[in-house]
Amino acid sequence: MITPQQAIARLIDNNELFYDEMTDLMRQIMSGQVPSEQIAAILTGLRIKVETVSEISAAAAVMREFATPVPVQDNTHLVDIVGTGGDGAQTFNISSTAMFVAAAAGAKVAKHGGRSVSSSSGAADVMEQMGASLNLSPEQVGGSIDNIGIGFMFAPNHHSAMRYVAPVRRSLGFRSIFNILGPLTNPAGAPNQLLGVFHIDLCGILSRVLQQLGSRHVLVVNGSDGLDEITITGATRVAELHNGRISEYDITPDQFGLPVYANLDDIRVADSTESLAMMNRVLAGETGAARDIVLLNAAACLYAGDIVPSLQEGVAAAAQAIDSGKAKAKQQAFIDYTRQAAAEQNA
């Protein structure tokens, strides 16, 4: 077993922590055994050294151990659509909108997210803005996934051990390993995922992490404009993990019959109110940049969930889900379900 002091000394010397050592260290941190000052030193040392695939994999595995799980009847086509954040783009909630579209086209979506840290509107912010209840029990979230094809897991409800780390993260003020651990620790155990990252190097790194963690079908994406989504302004790097094999390639909107936009200005918002308004316009069938970026990301979600055999067919399925009114209906079904579940909980 490694002590926090030993780990700090290793990191100061720019040495990697082995998988078992990182596992031990994370268990100590997540169980409240490590003082804040030492956690700060560990996070700083990891960031300066640069976290390895093995270190991230071990940390994510422990964070999954400590998470409050969500029971789901069948996870075959269960998919998470999530971003690391940190891209600074101030766009509307693309992945949350794509969630409704993908679910309307047949995916089972277990979305895991929280409030805004660096963006105009976090997933939880826009869910609350639309009138959905966030504070469901794990069983109620599982029921939402099983019955209507969507569940939203509000991160603080499922990661209580993060209370030992949260104040340190806030005081440090820079990105740490925990910025990438959240998207790797879905409480419903979704084996399929569309994961947006803030730097192109993370595509290869996190696809290998998820390979080690046993994921089935994952697309890790980064836009050439820095967006932690599939972008509409140019190329997006994709690292695809499928049945144990990883391939990397680039995609562009014009491959799918969509325009390439000059910038992201048409999809930027100031807050969750503006984000919800843009989401609702997309779900109502309005055309333009917001719809096109949702089509691409919903398509990737459907492809990762093995609902469609290709991204091309995913775009067509996503468009049909919006234009038929099914995506808007799915949003309303989700709102109604969470409100009813919350009422039952409080009765």
Image (cartoon, grey):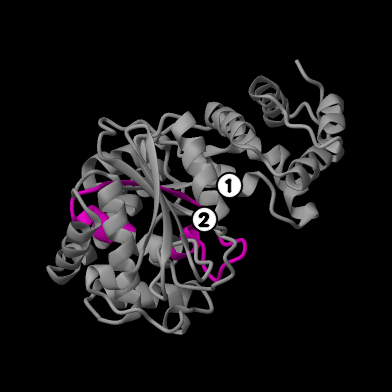
- In space, the residues marked 2 and 1 are separated at their CA atoms by 8 Å
Q: Which mark is residue 180?
A: 1
Q: Residue 35 falls in which quadrant of the image? A: top right
Q: Amino acid at mark 1?
A: Ile
For the residue pair 6 and 170, the one nearer the viewer reads as 6
Count the numbered circles shown: 2
Location of the C terminus (image quadrant)? top left
Q: Dot 2, crowdedness within 10 Å: few (<14), some or many (≥20)?
A: many
Q: Residue at x 57, y 32 (%)?
A: 57
Magenta-span inclusion, residue 120:
yes
Q: Is residue 312 left or right of residue 28?
A: left
Is residue 169 placed above or below 38 in the rendered structure?
Answer: below
> In the structure shown, which secondary structural element does the residue marked by tag 2 occupy?
loop
In percent of width and height, residue 152 lies at: 40, 49
Work out whether mark 2 precedes mark 1 in sequence or the reverse, and give the earlier one.
1
CB under 8 Å between callouts 2 and 1?
yes
Q: Which residue is painted at 30% across and 82% down in the image?
A: 288
Residue highlighted by disc 2: 197
**Hey, which quadrant is residue 116 in on the image?**
bottom right
Highlighted magenta segment, given as a residue range = 99-126
What residue is shown at x 70% (from left), y 44% (from top)?
A: 50
